[in-house]
Amino acid sequence: MKFANPLYYPIPVLAGAISLVIGVRVGQLPSGVMLPIATAIATIGATVRKAQEPDTLGLEDAELEKQVQAVRQQAKTLAERADALRTEATRLLSGADQMDLLVAVQFACDRADELPAKLDQLAQRLKGSDSLLSLSQLQQQLQEVKARQENSSGITREHLTKLANSLQRNIELAQQGQDTRQAQVVSLSTLILDAAGVLQSLQNRLRTVDLTDAQATGELRSLSDEFNSFQENVDLLVSR
């Protein structure tokens, strides 16, 4: 455990001072004995208070800090739900002819497990001196999305179109010399929330469809692929 500096927490310091006075005046204990005890009380109290405080990222922009914290929580929630889905899929998809689908679902869940760590890495980068994406980096991201659009169709293509529009707005902000970090985080939040919706659909279908029906399992695989595509888009936004 890393101890906190009591000087930043006046209430624990006050508690330590009171214990010192009571020990010396009321308990008639030597000050040399009570001083380390009072110091320990103040230090432990400060450490407890610090542990109760929410984690901070140290960003200079309070609104950006709030948004990043919210997206980090979204990623953690999504990972937890993916863990539950993995357990359920392992139980339901037990037939030999269902192994390919099970592997696809497990792979999607594994990718979701990686999201919180990726968001933590992004949070650290956002407070660095190189936190702003350059115009060329944003344009490269847009080019990658457009390349994916050419090889996609249906819902996946619609999601890529939305992401391309977001990146285009970020490029316009960068061209105007504005901070693109909040727009970047909003795009991430949208992607994660959409991915959570697909995950819920996948779980609902897994519980209700006839798993011996080829068409039904094909729908499940399609949802799994769609969930993976969201995570590929997240990877694109958090990579440099």
Image (cartoon, rainbow, N blue to C red):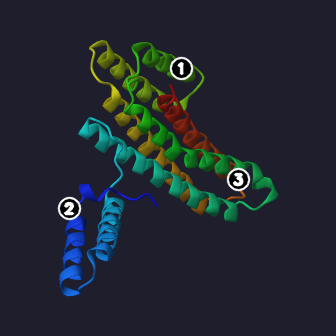
Identify the mark at residue 113; answer none if there is no mark.
none
* Residue at 70 percent of width and 53 percent of height: 102
Residue at left offset 37%, top offset 35%: 185
Q: Does 127 appear above or below 165? A: below
In percent of width and height, residue 121 lies at 48, 38
Q: Residue at x 42, y 46 (%)?
A: 72
The amino acid beneath tag 3 is Leu
Q: Between marks 1 and 3, how big is the CA–CA gap?
A: 29 Å
Earlier residue among tags 1 and 3: 3
What residue would you read off at disc 3?
Answer: 102
SS at mark 1 in the image: helix
Which badge, 3 or 2, is on the more N-terminal residue?
2
Q: Label 2 neighbourhood size at 10 Å, few (<14), some (14-19), many (20+)?
A: few
- For marks 3 and 2, give the one nearer the viewer: 2
Check disc 3 and report its element: helix, strand or loop.
Answer: helix
Give the structural element (helix, strand or loop) at label 2: helix
- The residue type indicated by label 1 comes to Glu
- Mark 2 in CB contact with mark 1 (< 8 angstroms): no
Q: Tell whether 97 sits left or right of 132.
A: right
Label 1 crowd (10 A; few <14 / some 14-19 / many >=20): some
Q: Which mark is residue 144?
A: 1
> Dot 2 corresponds to which residue?
10
| Label 3 with label 2: CB-CB less than 8 Å | no
Q: List the single residue furthest toward the bottom.
A: 27
Position in image of residue 28 (x %, y %): 23, 85
Amino acid type at image mark 2: Pro
Is 29 on the left-hand or right-hand side of 217? left
